[in-house]
Amino acid sequence: MKRSLLTLMRCDATQGAMRRMKILLAAPVVLGSAGCVQVSAPEKPIEINLNINIRQEVVVRLQQDVRDLIKENPGVF
Amino acid sequence: MSRRTRLILAAGVALAVVAGGSGVASAMIQDASAQLRASGQVGEQADGYLGLVGSAPAAVRAQVDAVNIKRRAYYTDLAAKRGAKIEEVAATTACELFRTKVAPGQYYRLPDGVWRQRDAAPIPLPAYCG
């Protein structure tokens, strides 16, 4: 009696593990497909909002900093 | 040759390889945006970022993205330093790039969203550029 109970318990544990295994196996599939959606390049170029809302005085204030930034990073600008 | 000498030699060779490699990489990065503009597939936009003029190969798109990510980081940094918006720094930079970096024959995009090719004359700048 004691032995069969143990066997039963072991079986239960195995089934539990199997269930966990399935979940574990399913997880990468879900994660993988989510990753694919993020990585896949869009067919059309990304729409960029070109509505510039800026005052001239702001441009004048930032101009020298921006000139320095461009000069210091020739590869990026 | 002692074991120690060999070790030092190996380290030296490894260092030279690494230094040489980074030299090539920085040379490639040095004029990445200039090369992209010169390719005719990429142009400067009024929002301060590079854009694809038409449908470009994935390699070009990847390079544009890489440059734009760096630009965004610089804009963010400068904006924080000067208490300005990122978009303001970016737009100001675009004004400057239109003035100094877009050569005749290269492409640019003003706030109207239309890609144009620069001719011999300077780019007609938006009023806010000053």
Image (tube, rainbow, N blue to C red):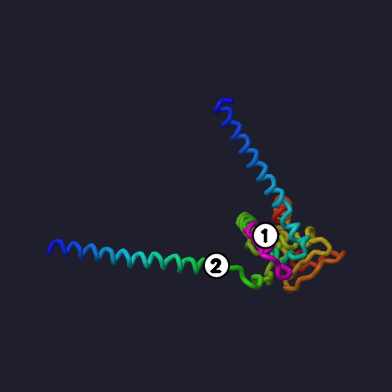
Please check whether the numbered discs 1 and 2 fall on a single chain.
no
The magenta segment: B52-72
Mark 1 vs 2: CB contact within 8 A? no
Tag on residue A38? Answer: 2
Comparing B37 with B101, the one in front is B37
The amino acid type, in three-letter code, at marker 1 is: Gln
- Outermost left residue: A1
Is residue B78 found inside the magenta-colored segment of the image? no
B29 relative position to A4: left or right: right
Picture residue at 53% right of the left edge, 67% below the top: A36
Most extreme residue toward the top is: B2
Badge 1 density bin: few <14, some 14–19, many ≥20, Cα 10 Å: some
- Which quadrant of the figure has residue B107? bottom right
For label 2, the SS is helix
- Residue B80 is left or right of residue A17, and the answer is right
User: Residue at label 1?
Assistant: B63
| Rendered position, B25 above or below A34 | above
Q: Place residue B5 in its image quadrant.
A: top right
The residue that appears at 66% across and 70% down in the rendered structure is A45
Question: Measured from the top left, where is residue B22 in percent x and y?
Answer: 66, 45
Query: Is residue B71 magenta-colored?
Result: yes
SS under mark 1: helix
How far apart are labels 1 and 2 at the CA level? Answer: 18 Å
Q: Can residue B65 be seen in this view?
A: yes
Q: Which residue type does callout 2 highlight? A: Gln
Residue located 79% across and 70% down the image: B116
Q: Nearer the viewer, residue A46 or A56?
A: A46
- The chain containing the residue under callout 2 comes to A
User: Quick one: which residue is furthest to the right in this view?
Assistant: B120
